[in-house]
Amino acid sequence: MAAAQQRRPSASPSPALRSSESEREEEEIEFDRKAAGIMIPDLFTQFPPVRDPLVTATSTVQDETIEACLPFLSGEDENLQYNEHGVPRLDRDRHVRFLHQCLRRLPGRFVAADASRPWFLYWCLSALTMLGEDVASYRDAIVATARSMQNDSGGFGGGGGQLSHLATTYAVVLSLALVGGQEAYEVVDRKAMWRWLCSLKQPDGGFQVCLGGEEDIRGAYCAAVIITLLRLPLDLTPESPAYTGDSSVNLFTGVADYVQRCQTYEGGISGQPNAEAHGAYAFCALGCLALLDHPGRSISSYLDVPRLIAWLSARQYAPEGGFSGRTNKLVDGCYSHWVGGCFPLVEACLNSSSSSSGPMAAGGPAATITTTTITDRHRPPPADESLFNREGLIRYILCCCQDQTKRGGLRDKPGKMSDAYHSCYVLSGLSSAQHQWELDELNDDNDGDDDSNELKKEGAAEGAMEAAWAVLPYLDGPQVFDSKDRVRPIHPVYAIPQPCVRAMKEYFDRKQGF
Ligand code: FPP
Ligand code: K
Ligand code: ZN
């Protein structure tokens, strides 16, 4: 375990203006790093070799961000113990302590986040689970808290007396899945939930996030997660704004078309049609499509995949190694999940189209829609390649996103405080980078999540279908992190461990009706 102890050179204001003196200092550091037995590719230790000379507010904050990240990435931070690849250890114990702390009573200044209490539950339980902790000890507390947040009219609000919202409902349902067990599952009033979801369903295919609220792609993703995890029927109530009387129109009708309308000229996905592409919405779009049908059909049928991949790839920066959320904005640890988590879904799409006779081969529900042609140029890369630079993402996470003080937790970037949200999504991104997912080939069914309307069907093969996603540790390429620092894998769509997904679905499959 080699450690670089020397101080970093004084940061020069702009790389273009670097004095030969500081260049010399950098060479010394470079030499010392090698002497200390640390090898880091130049890609992660230097400003990009080709730079736009135009100075703007955007380029200035970008340069400042690189300056702030470089000491951490270059093996120079005094508080970190680097391995021979210049990567520090995952500080599990401190992160675990931080996350348990975030599940206790929070200081008064958190009052503004009161309506997000379900999110704190999910972020902390999910992060703790990825770190290998058993969160079943929180079951009783989660059950009581979730009950206090449920409305008789269906769904969960941010707390007692608060309006049900799809985001808080998503967070509560995932929290219940994470603690697991009958008592947790039985908290949910599924009949009221189904009726409430029908009331949010819009004629254009999307979902309002709450009654009378905005319609956006978060709503579509959260609804698809809730419907499939709870095995709700897809039928619409006559009270639904989307009800037509035609029994083939259901909760999933038009959702993929809605998602398609959110793809922008950049190739990314916006929150609503005709808005700005953002990484968080790309994950919502792909997750939603992957629940509606096999991603080999749904993603390739509804999205321009080559343009999407171009946009996703442009989110990864060097030397930082992490992702930004949108064009001309800064790297941020949480996009390790929102953007990083898109790649397994895109890969599942590409891999299925390469080995079947085409994405539309089985003629799924998407068959009536114009398809995106996947040319040979866009066939999946060989197995030893990845659509993103996993090493870069792992470096950003372990070097730049860990709070090294006794506080612990994970963060957006150096200089920012750690918090529960970033702890969850940085670890989710680490999990994506450390694993590879494989999905069974296209068949007449989807990945096991489209059978919700077959609630009453006996012995449906959901368990078998759920096994369609298979996970392996990602072992190709340089392994820059210590194997003890591999976190638990999470399901690429539900973002919680696959056994939690399976247990909840199987529980509701065994129930007759509601
Ligand atoms: C911009 O913030 C952020 C957004 C426009 C969307 C954020 C949405 C999510 C993170 C989650 C949505 C998903 C679900 C499931 C609810 P910013 O301007 O502070 O950050 P930026 O500069 O990085 O874009
Ligand atoms: K941000
Ligand atoms: Zn963030």
Image (spheres, rainbow, N blue to C red):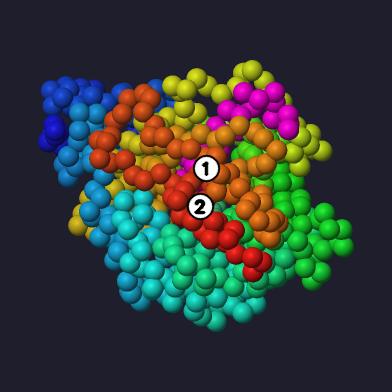
Query: What residue would you read off at disc 1?
Result: 467
Please name the amino acid that badge 1 sits on. Answer: Ala
Quadrant holding the N terminus: top left
Residue 125 on image: x %, y %: 38, 60
Q: Earlier in the sequence, mark 2 or mark 1?
A: 1
Q: What is the count of numbered marks?
A: 2
Q: Residue at point 67% right, 41% down?
A: 445
Q: Quadrant of residue 514?
A: bottom right
**How far apart are the alpha carbons under marks 2 and 1?**
8 Å
Instruction: Measuring from the top left, give residue 118's x and y in whole percent.
Output: 47, 67
Point out which mark residue 502 bears.
2
Judge from the rendering whether residue 143 lies leftward or rightward of residue 366; answer left or right. Answer: left
Location of residue 441 by image quarter: top right
Q: Does residue 375 sit above or below 67 in this rendering?
A: above
The residue under the point 36% across, 54% down is: 129
Left or right: 414 as drawn, with respect to 240: left
Q: Is residue 179 visible in the rendered structure shown here?
A: yes
Magenta span includes 510 = no
SS at circle 1: loop
